[in-house]
Amino acid sequence: MHTLIFATNNRNKVAEIQSLVGPNFEIIPLKEAGIEIDIPEPHDQLEANALEKAMTIFKMTNQACFSEDTGLEIAALDGAPGVKSARYAGENSNAQANIDLVLSKMTGIENRSAQFRTVICLIWKNQTYYFEGICKGQILTTMQGENGFGYDPIFIPDGASKSFANMTMDEKNQFSHRKKAMTQLFEFLGTL
Ligand code: ITT
């Protein structure tokens, strides 16, 4: 059994990752670990932000932990919102404002290719490891669906017939960036 603290304040990420955990792993979200801090994300790369989050929590707990940083990378917007996905429409913006900004910038643009990219940073026995998961797809022209979080209503993965926000969590897991990155983490730890 491996126990890991998950360095996030995003309860949607916690729910998705809890849905992937098998019997050999125990994932402890920050809240359950009794840690309440706003972890800084000052960098312009997903990898650096993921390291910052994991290292912040590792220094506080001295326990094995991981974090993840995820960005929606839209080809026609030169990879934006990317690392700024959580605050694309401003420092205190919410998902609706971020979606509105993406849709307005994409008005009239034919190339709607995009990808979600998740980078996980794991700190395990004083070493740092990275895992990446990518989900390619398209940006819709309108919002579709009520499930999920963030940009899910405007993203349809390649090979799917509905948006992430029209999927159950299990359906989203069949395509998702987060699932792909987590699978690698579980495989890595499973070999130790
Ligand atoms: P933590 O840093 O505490 O983990 P956060 O919400 O700040 O949580 P990120 O820095 O990784 O997380 O921000 C990524 C943003 O991208 C997030 O707030 C969502 O709006 C969006 N996002 C991430 N994963 C997503 C997914 O699976 N589907 C839709 N949008 C997603």
Image (cartoon, helix red, strand yellow):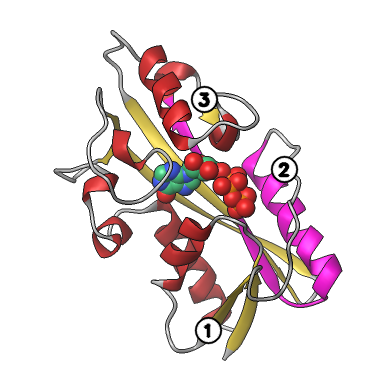
The amino acid beneath tag 2 is Glu
Answer yes or no: is residue 70 visible.
no
Write down the residue under mark 2: 41
Question: Is residue 67 within the magenta segment?
Answer: yes
**Which span of residues is magenta-colored?**
45-74
Image quadrant holding the N terminus, namely: bottom right
- SS for dot 2: loop
* Front residue (pair 48, 100): 100
* Front residue (pair 131, 22): 22
The amino acid beneath tag 3 is Ala
| Dot 1 beta carbon under 8 Å from ligand 1 | no
Task: Say whether disc 2 or disc 1 marks the residue closer to the N-terminus.
Answer: 1
Q: In the rendered view, would you say 66 is above or below 90? A: below
Task: Say whether disc 1 or disc 3 marks the residue closer to the N-terminus.
Answer: 1
| Count of residue discs | 3
- Could you tell whether 190 is left or right of 40 in the image? left
Write down the residue under mark 1: 25
List x then y, in percent, for residue 12: 46, 57
- SS for dot 3: loop
| Dot 2 beta carbon under 8 Å from ligand 1 | yes
On residue 80, the disc is: 3
Task: Say whether disc 2 or disc 3 marks the residue closer to the N-terminus.
Answer: 2
Q: Residue at x 28, y 46 (%)?
A: 164
